[in-house]
Amino acid sequence: MTAGAEAAAGDPGWRFDNAYARLPPLLFARVAPTPVRAPRLVWLNRPLAAELGLDPDALAAGAAEWFSGNRPPAGAEPIAQAYAGHQYGHFTNLGDGRAILLGEQITPAGTRVDIQLKGAGRTPFSRSGDGRAALGPMLREAIVGEAMHALGIPTTRALAVVATGEPVYRERVLPGAVLARVAASHLRVGTFQFAAALGREDLLEVLLAHAVDRHAPALVADPEPALAFLAWLLERQTSLVARWMAVGFVHGVMNTDNMALSGETIDYGPCAFLDAYDPDTVFSSIDQHGRYAFARQPAIAHWNLARFAETLIPLIPGGEEAAIGRLEAALAPFPEHFERERTAGLARKLGLPDAEPGDAALARDLLAAMTAARADHTATFAALEPLAAGDGPPPAEHAAALAPVWLEAWRARLERQPGGRAAAGPRLAAANPAVIPRNHLVEEALAAAAGGDIGPCERLIDAVSRPFAPRPEDAPYRLGPPPGSGCYRTFCGT
Ligand code: AMP
Ligand code: MG
């Protein structure tokens, strides 16, 4: 931390105000990132930097030092957050074992966002871990986060990836990296579980006030903030999971410590997008019982929300029994609310502005045919747009999923919409992405990056950043996996 280095990279516009670091000290540990040998900026998210009020050129000049953690930015107050969580159903005390929150940047729009370094070295919560991350998984998080953002799905985002110049030891020796991650906050279901496990009502109260203030300020004056926030979060979570499913996203590790109270998607580990549509799809090699399979995501989100609700019991006046009754009542609408969101999402994917009673069945029939045909999720829905106005059959590669009987029913349904079938085209194009981060392309791009070539990652991020308006040169990014490539597997050695 030399004054000379400070002068070398000018202030890009840091504006930190660290509210979390002012909470009771039990909730975090002050800890500096561990310096790395040879920090080098690998990738910078210039549009995001600009949104945060950070000058992209000035940021690029200092990013290697700031985001490796070798010299935290001015105004940062590095901390590791305490949290607990149910991992695959089992409760554990966790905490940021390899992540260090630099602080909260206040953006020109006046919003407050966390900037966190993932892979920044050991913390008091590291247990047996090395506190480090490998380049591939950090770039995967950047790629998938940018894709989700472009798809209109709430998500944390990567601001930068910095190579450390140090090896990390997993199943193999891999290049190390630090991810600078931007999030509405890093509050998790597990944050409340940590305080609840300590039996500390006072901490729960402080956390609830903090969460409401940050994420649901309209509820600040609510006479029953715990119940109001739970209802708010239920809406966020049902909508989030419905949006995941609309694009074929499998999070892969929906432990309660990976469920953000902001309603953003967080912690891209063994996540992936469906190629062939199959509700039982599991990508993660360690999810042996399919707990986090594609179609189980709503049930798991509901379960996780119930774990959150349990932590709120002491905050509801009138005694434990009454509190449980009211929390259960608040959770009860989850399945119905989710079904409504899921059906609305599917109706949009069919080009319908509003769901009618028969639409859920129309969508279900298509999904059943897609499952039977092992049809590509993204390509099948993208094929609908050119079929809406005309009467012709689908291209041969979609014939198995888009049967004549179904097409006829769908076209008849479109006729009844204002504007008829002709009006459906733009709606279909806006609802069905042509480009998602294809698993085989992500792997190719990460392999190139490990070999020192960031180009394929940059081009992939560019392509997934315009999912609904592909250019001719994006054609290769629309293709499914090469035939015979078998089941895609992700590994948790991140
Ligand atoms: P995750 O599965 O990535 O959500 O992480 C679960 C828990 O393990 C969190 O408490 C992480 O901070 C911790 N963790 C994961 N990888 C490491 C590592 N390499 N070193 C220390 N802690 C880790
Ligand atoms: Mg996590």
Image (spheres, rainbow, N blue to C red):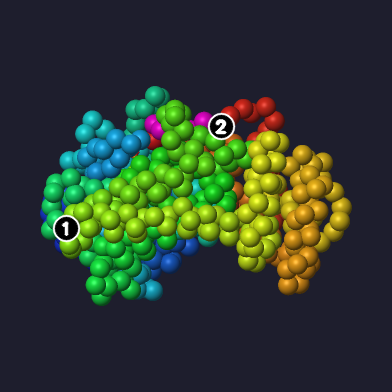
- At a point 30% along the width and 40% down the height, the residue shown is 86
- The rendered magenta stretch, by its main secondary structure, is classed as loop
Question: In terms of image quarters, where does ligand 1 lie?
Answer: top left
Quarter-wise, where is residue 431 in the image? bottom right
Q: Where on the picture, by quarter, is residue 355? A: bottom right
SS for dot 2? loop
Q: What is the secondary structure assignment of the residue under circle 1?
A: loop
Report the side of 35 relative to 294 (left or right).
left
**Magenta region:** 488-493
| Image x and y of residue 258, in percent | 35, 46
Sequence-first disc among 2 and 1:
1
Camera-side mark, 2 or 1: 1
Q: Which mark is residue 488?
A: 2
Q: Name the kind of residue labelled 1 in the image.
A: Gly
In the image, 173 versus 437, the foreground residue is 437
- Decide which of 173, 343 is in the foreground and name it: 343
Give the number of the disc on residue 319.
Answer: 1
Residue 396 or residue 438, whichever sits in front: 396
For badge 2, the amino acid type reads Tyr
**How would you rate the neighbour count of disc 2 (Cα within 10 Å): few for under 14, some for 14-19, many for 20 or more?**
some
- Residue 471 at x, y percent in the picture: 69, 56
In the image, farthest residue toward the right:
392
Residue 172 seen: yes
